[in-house]
């Protein structure tokens, strides 16, 4: 008799990611995840004492996938515009993961400023600051403006209320960036 395949925590999280992609985060449970793995529910419950713990682990993995996606900028595209386009494109290509990340209540940190001040955004903010010539504080303000603009587009698209038109969206995103930088530079002169 062949040895039993050992179901690892990583395998369970990957299977749960597939459940989210196909059925939505609301359907993460021991039965759907074990079904994805073609095993009993026992390994799922062994590694994750509660489904809430599993959902948190899946959220962290989805966040990692999202970050990798954002930083994979097409050649020749401005990094700031590229990150914004990738944010919106992620909502197009992975709507269920997008909803889980940004519309499920699983995000850690309670405020927008906590997110902006997190260490994860330092590379993005540094690139924005270099590209704009603004102070660190004004760069954060520009980031918030552009991020909220991109998030609005992405949310509407992820919820099937808008077609994805990359050239139009890129133009709008660039206009938001330019307007926010111009406004911030005007405020710095005051």
Image (spheres, rainbow, N blue to C red):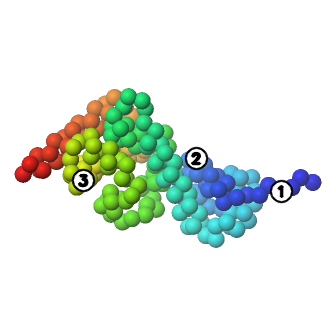
Q: Is residue 89 visible to the viewer in this orientation of the structure?
A: no
Q: CA distance from mark 2 to mark 3?
A: 40 Å
21 over 162 or under it: above or below: below
Give the mark nearest the N terminus, 2 or 3: 2
In the picture, measured across the screen, residue 91 lies left or right of residue 7, that is left
- Mark 2 Cα-neighbour bin, 10 Å: few <14, some 14–19, many ≥20: some
Q: Please tell me which residue is depicted at 35% across the width and 41% down the height of the picture.
A: 84
Give the mark nearest the N terminus, 2 or 1: 1
Q: Please tell me which residue is depicted at 48% across the width and 53% down the height of the picture.
A: 63
Circle on res. 4? 1
SS under mark 3: helix
Q: Looking at the picture, how far across and down is residue 125, in whole percent?
A: 32, 49
State if disc 1 and disc 2 touch (CB < 8 Å).
Answer: no
Give the mark nearest the N terminus, 3 or 1: 1
* Residue matched to label 2: 22
In the picture, measured across the screen, residue 4 lies left or right of residue 108, that is right
Q: Please tell me which residue is depicted at 36% across the width and 31% down the height of the picture.
A: 77
Q: CA distance from mark 2 to mark 1?
A: 27 Å
Q: Looking at the picture, how far across and down is residue 38, in whole percent?
A: 74, 52
State if disc 1 and disc 3 touch (CB < 8 Å).
Answer: no
Figure quadrant of the N terminus = bottom right
* Residue matched to label 3: 136
């Amino acid at each position: 008799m062949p040895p039993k395949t050992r179901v690892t925590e990583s395998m369970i999280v990957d299977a749960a990611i597939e459940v989210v992609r196909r059925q939505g985060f609301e359907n993460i449970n021991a039965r759907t995840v074990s079904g994805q793995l073609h095993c009993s529910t026992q390994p799922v419950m062994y590694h994750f004492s509660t489904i809430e713990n599993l959902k948190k682990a899946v959220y962290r993995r989805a966040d990692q996938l999202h970050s990798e996606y954002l930083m994979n900028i097409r050649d020749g595209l401005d990094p700031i515009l590229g990150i914004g386009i990738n944010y919106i494109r992620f909502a197009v290509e992975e709507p269920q993961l997008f909803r889980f990340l940004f519309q499920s209540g699983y995000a850690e940190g309670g405020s927008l400023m906590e997110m902006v001040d997190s260490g994860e955004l330092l590379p993005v903010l540094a690139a924005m600051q270099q590209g704009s010539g603004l102070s660190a504080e004004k760069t954060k303000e520009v980031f918030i403006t552009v991020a909220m603009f991109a998030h609005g587009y992405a949310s509407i698209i992820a919820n099937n209320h808008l077609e994805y038109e990359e050239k139009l969206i890129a133009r709008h995103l660039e206009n938001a960036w330019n307007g926010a930088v111009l406004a911030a530079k005007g405020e710095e002169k005051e």
